[in-house]
Amino acid sequence: MSGPENKVHDIVLGGFGGQGVKVIATLLAQAAHYDGKHAMMYNIYAAAIRGGPIHCTVRVSDQAILGGPTTTAPSAVLAMDPDAMRVYEDVLRPGGTLVVNSTLVSDHPRRNDLNVVSVPTNEIAGEIGDMKYTGMVALGALAAHTGVVSLEAISNCLEQILPPYRHHMIPDNVQALQRGAACPGSLVPS
């Protein structure tokens, strides 16, 4: 159910295998629960193909969610590659947030009614020390520019979501979130 007192976010995250899209979608949904909200996640990917396309939808709501977390009009899109940008820019709700991995997506959005956040995820991840942080950088930007979850909630869920052999990377993941959150966004000029 959606009403004036219930804020619903339908977020699509798209990219290719190896960018951490499934991990950050899972983390986004778990962080929503941490923040006292309801969340569901749905993903589509070619499990047998590293580098194959992956698309995840996360629905976050202040109230219980009825039905599946699929959408034809997301409120936010995280485009980690040019294909995700091409597929989802046109269906993003007016006034929605489009977070773009500017390292791999060179095209500028065609629409002028979006909050666009251009994030050089690969460069920032490289500065932190590992390309594994690209998705976390993008998630920080998404969280900061949509307000769907707090950075604190994401940070507090890292230990639960990441496998134990990755726990030593949590401080760098937190830094990646913060660096992504610091990227400015703006409405595309008319």
Image: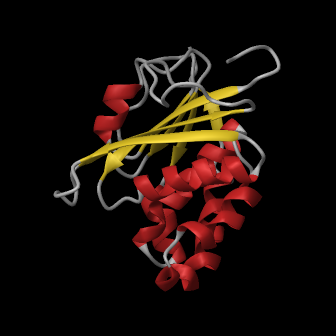
What residue appears at the point 39 percent right and 27 percent down from the top-left corner?
Answer: 88
The residue positioned farthest toward the left in the image shown:
48
Q: Is residue 6 left or right of residue 49?
A: right
Q: How many marks?
A: 0
Left or right of 141 in this view: 36: right
Nearer the observer, 108 or 42: 42
Assign the N terminus to one quadrant of the image: top right
In depth, the one of 169 and 31 nearer the eye is 31
Residue drawn at 42 percent across, 54 percent down: 22
* Figure check: 70 above or below 140: above
Q: Is residue 15 above or below residue 127?
A: above
Residue visible at 48% across and 79% down in the picture: 129
* Rendered image quadrant of residue 188: top right
Residue 48 locus on image (x, y percent) = 17, 58
- Classify residue 156 by image quadrant: bottom right
Which one is nearer the viewer's eye here, 6 or 136?
A: 6
Residue 76 position, x and y percent, is 55, 31
With respect to residue 15, does 96 lie above or below? above
Scheme by which the image is coloured: secondary structure
Q: Position of residue 187 (x, y in %)?
A: 62, 25
